[in-house]
Image: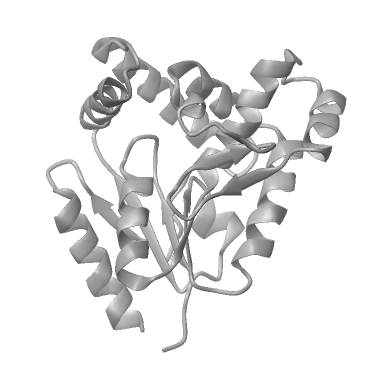
């Protein structure tokens, strides 16, 4: 059976990566977490102390950046396991900031498109179906209420031992939604041919089953 590419877009904490990983197991596909790539850039910006508004400094930073994913879902930045480090609230907001920069977007989109050429990838992010993989055979737009997404992120943080405040998380998600959907370059939006799924009242199993049905019909 020939493989296809699946694009999953949606706002922060809508469950994109969780669902993508589950689908990969069922389909024997590879997961490319584009959000993690932007988080890696954000972490490097914070570590080096550069001004993310300095285009020249950003270009220099991107020249030597190396982002890798292990088969078990770990994220490596320049050879270091940063799976937990990129999930803090500080890096989440910085990722939203650096993702507005055309220099960063162009660099990462090229990387993502090159990887996905061989098919068999599930890629999630904000602009996969509209910019990165406009020719993806299946496009999903996942969403959920800000309150539901904040609670999910809060529980994730608790599991990781990261201190957070539910009210503050809700406000940050609302702010990030606005920033992501109003940025100049590649804003968060649903592709015209994407199927929207509101996961607010759905379990992971229910979401996976619904998308699997869509994929099987396409295949």
Q: Is residue 131 left or right of residue 176?
A: right
In percent of the image, x 36 and y 47: which residue is there?
16
Q: Residue 151, position in %: x, y?
A: 22, 25
Residue 46 in the image: above or below residue 101: above
Q: Locate residue 192, reporting x and y percent.
A: 44, 62
Task: Assign the C terminus to one quadrant of the image.
Answer: bottom left
Q: Nearer the viewer, residue 66 or 55?
A: 66
Which residue is rendered at x = 37% and y = 63% of the image? Answer: 24
- Please report the residue visible at 42 percent of the width from the left and 21 percent of the height from the top: 175
Is residue 99 in sight in this rendering?
no
Q: Is residue 80 left or right of residue 217?
A: right
Give x and y (percent) for residue 88.
45, 21
Please tell me in which quadrant of the rendered image residue 102 appears: top right
Q: Is 200 displayed left or right of 98 in the figure?
A: left
Above or below, 212 against 172 in this view is below
Foreground residue among 127 and 154: 154
Q: How many marks?
A: 0
- Point out residue 139 in the picture as x, y percentages from the top left corner: 41, 64
Which is more toward the observer, 211 or 36?
Answer: 36
Q: Residue at x 30, y 19 (%)?
A: 170
Q: Residue furthest bottom?
A: 1
Q: Is 36 left, or right, of 65 in this rendering?
A: left
The quarter of the image holding the N terminus is bottom left
């Amino acid at each position: 059976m020939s493989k296809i590419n699946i694009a999953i877009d949606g706002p922060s904490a809508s469950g994109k990566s969780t669902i993508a990983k589950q689908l990969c197991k069922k389909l024997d596909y590879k997961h490319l977490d584009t959000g993690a790539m932007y988080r890696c850039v954000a972490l490097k910006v914070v570590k080096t102390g550069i001004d993310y508004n300095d285009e020249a400094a950003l270009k220099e930073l991107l020249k030597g950046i190396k982002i890798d994913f292990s088969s078990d879902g770990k994220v490596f930045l320049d050879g270091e396991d940063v799976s937990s480090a990129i999930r803090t609230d500080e890096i989440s907001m910085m990722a939203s900031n650096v993702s507005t920069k055309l220099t960063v977007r162009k660099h990462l989109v090229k990387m993502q498109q090159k990887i996905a050429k061989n098919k068999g990838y599930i890629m999630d992010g904000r602009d996969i179906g509209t910019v990165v993989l406009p020719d993806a055979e299946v496009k999903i737009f996942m969403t959920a209420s800000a309150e539901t997404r904040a609670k999910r992120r809060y529980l994730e943080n608790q599991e990781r031992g990261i201190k957070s405040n539910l009210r503050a998380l809700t406000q940050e998600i609302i702010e990030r939604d606005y920033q992501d959907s109003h940025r100049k370059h590649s804003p968060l939006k649903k592709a015209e041919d994407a199927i929207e799924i509101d996961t607010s009242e759905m379990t992971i199993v229910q979401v996976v089953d619904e998308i699997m049905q869509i994929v099987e019909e396409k295949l």
